[in-house]
Image: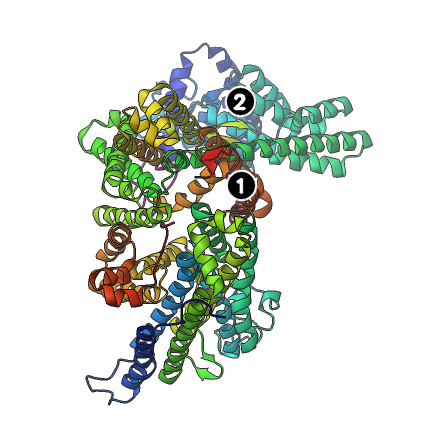
Amino acid sequence: MRRGPALLGRTGWLVFAAAAILALVVVPGLATLPPPDSGLRLPAYLVPLFGKYLCYALLALALDLIWGFAGILSLGQGAFFALGGYCMGMYLMRQIGTRGVYGNAELPDFMVFLNWKSLPWPWWFFGYFPYAMVMALVVPGLLAAAFGWLAFRSRVTGVYLSIITQAMTYALMLAFFRNDMGFGGNNGLTDFKDILGFEIQAPATRLTLYAVTAATLGAAFLLCRFIVTSKLGRILLALRDAEARVRFLGYSTAGAKLFVFVLSAMLCGLAGALYVPQVGIINPGEFAPGNSIEIAIWVAVGGRGTLGGAILGALVVNLAKTWLTDAAPEAWLFVLGALFILVTLLLPKGILGLAARLSPILGRRLVPARSGSDV
Amino acid sequence: MRIVRGVRAILLLLSLTLLPLAAWAADLGPALDDLAAGGFEERARAIETLGASGDPRAIVILRALTEGTLEVTGDKRVVIAKDSGAVDPLTGAAVELGGEPERIRVNNRLRGEIEAALARLNLFSPDRAQRLEAARAVLHQPDPAGAPVLEQALAAEKDSGVAEALRLALAATTLQSGDMPAKLKAIATLADSSDPEIRRLLGEVADTADAAEIKAAAAEALRVIAQRNLAIEMAANIFQGVSLGSVLLLAAIGLAITFGVMGVINMAHGEMIMLGAYTTYVVQEAFRAWLPPAWFGLYLIVAVPAGFLTAAIVGAAIERGIIRFLYGRALETLLATWGISLMLQQAVRSLFGAPNKEVSNPAWMTGGFDLAGGFTVTWNRVVIIGFSLAVLGLLTLVLRRTSLGLYIRAVTQNRRMAAVVGIPTGRVDMLTFALGSGIAGMAGVALSQIGNVSPNLGTIYIVDSFMVVVFGGVGNLAGTLAGAMGLGITNKLLEPFAGAVLGKILVLVGIIIFIQFRPRGLFALKGRAVES
């Protein structure tokens, strides 16, 4: 039985392969092969930076899956991201062992500082890498499942959903700022030493983390493409455009939405887990509602409902951010704000939509046909 | 410093001698003779007499004694030495010195007695605060010997607050020494107060008194006090809840218009509040720079319309320039207005700088009054509660009684039909949005009085404002009022048990769960409007 459109068209596969070669061969090659003083050599600090962008791209991909295809604009994706990050952070904290300031093998520094006697239960087993990784997926997944089950069952949609997801991440931010929560309070978790026995600051470790992130992003992209081209994907598109009608036709819209919502949350958790070892810190600021809204602009800039566009948008916006915050720090918020306004006013389909308008043939191959009104 | 105080006391004394107090002079005379006579025994007696006299002039004499300026002349007259000469301690008149006067010496024992005598004398001080302090001092260290003085002071006291303190002090003294019925009566008097010191005293009595009756009475009084304190604490929490609710209400009313009535998700709403707060700052600085200081208290009155206009003009520009192209695309509106909020924040940061700006309360808003048992109501909170209700009332009037209100409601209910009957819907949209933004600006004026004025001011309120509107029910001002007060009071009632942050988290989680059951809020619109 045919599932509908192919996973990727020929142009799509070509672009995918080119991106994979660029990310997994060219960048690592430039970072290691040319002599350190040559102009071709990629400076060492750029590798974790690229890794960070790819984490953001994964985040954007996860949001596009639910916003672009199911019409769920979650403003709480940052919460899932941060939760995944905290799971990884807790593993990394446990790896510090006796090398902390207080040299306590059992407790992280901040707990010694708070005069705690034993490891609180949420921290149990986080010394084991596989457990931490599973938790980085399960914790955001469970939160999304509980939240989504409640919300979709009672048909909370549109802006109401956006607002309460925002309230969720805000509440979590307040909670994680408290020292009593046992996750380092205001300072968060930082000062990591090594991951799986490798020194976390070493160039080789960083390059590996970067490569793992790139590969994960590629795999996540294919997974999302698989979902949106499947029968479930058709249902999602249909309910995005006319949810009541889909429900009357006998489909469980709540179930379909819940599935992608949980999957998206898990992808966000994964992005967070990959992000933390590369930037070296996780703190409650990651829960800030503003961060989650920013993800939406990455997706919107690239082109909503295209998956590839979300990745492109995240990369473009963050490259611009890095460049501008350095070149003209005052101007960055103006640019970001203007981007929000101009994209929504003039480029409702983002960069990919613009490309499609400029070059109809290329556009048709890159941007899947969309129907219905924007939600 | 002490000299200055001494001089001030002399001046007071001079003014007091004009009052018909001269009769006391005779009482102080023998004491002065005792002081002049020499022996420490006589001096102690003199201090005792002075302390019990209740005469303000005794204060001056005793102070002079501790400062070593009280002198005795060759002819056994007591004078107070001044830089310019000597004065008579009773009349304040200058005295011709016949020969070198001798300082009246005191030892440590006398010093202690002078302290005690002064403390008692302060009960008669012309300064209300000093009398109150003296009464409290007795309360903290009740001394049975001081009872007659207290009674004397109580009889002369005109101020009800000081009289109350004196009664309590007297009761505390009686508790130490009186007979059984007097003690029981004293306990009953003490039970009326919430002073922690009295609870300590009663606790001591309840533990150590000899008679079981007194023990029981003290325990009962403690129970009454605890119960009353609980009630006061509850009332205080509710007041603070109403106060927080009024802040939430102010922050949310504008949003109730732009989001509730127009359906625009205005993420820049918080920045409208911020603009209002910065307008207040500018108006304040203008008053400081160009107008006489006496007018400064009026700046806030001027700031209210100024804040409204600033935010309303910016709001109208945003509606015409951006939002009108996005009607019907709620999520896109959310993103675009978020962009506006970022730009406004950065614009204000570039103009005024990132640090907080200082906005001061005008004199008529500072201070407060003690309502009951340490529960102080500050004026700025009272003003803000009143202001928020006034704004809500005014807005209701505008919506119900003006033609603009009629147009707004018509366009909300059926845009096409409204256009058909000739209502300029585009203009109404602009005015509605300007109205909502302007109200947010007025909220900013009020909020500048109780919080920091910084470029991030708006971000503090944005989540809360949406919560209030969503909780109360979209498109319903009564719902907004109920939502704001409900959230504010719940928050403050939770605080004593859960702490400020956890209380807030619980409220947020509560709202999230509440939305699941009433997705359209407390006061949901019924009928077909729900589906659109």
Which residue corresponds to the image point at 33% horizontal and 60% vertical from the top-left? A298
Image location of residue B514, percent across then percent down: 56, 43
Disc 2 residue type (three-letter): Gly
Foreground: B451 or A148?
A: A148
- Secondary structure beneath dot 1 equals helix
Crowd class of label 2 (few under 14; some 14 to 19; many from 20; radius 10 Å)? few
Q: Is residue A204 visible?
A: yes
Which residue corresponds to the image point at 29% horizontal and 65% vertical from the top-left? A364
Foreground: A17 or B509?
A: A17
Label disc, if present, on residue B236 of the rendered structure: none
Label disc, if present, on residue B491 of the rendered structure: 1
Q: Quadrant of residue A299?
A: bottom left
Q: Quadrant of residue A304?
A: bottom left
**Which span is picked out in magenta?**
B445-456
Q: Are marks 1 and 2 in contact (CB under 8 Å)?
A: no
Foreground: B88 or A199?
A: A199
Rounded to the nearest angstrom, the CA distance separating label 1 from label 2 is 34 Å
Image location of residue A274, percent across then percent down: 43, 72
Instruction: Chain letter for mark 2, please.
Output: B
Q: Is residue B494 left or right of residue B128?
A: right
What residue sits right under mark 2 in the picture? B161
Count of all numbered marks drawn on residues in the image: 2
Q: Is residue B150 left or right of residue B85?
A: right
- Secondary structure beneath dot 2 equals helix
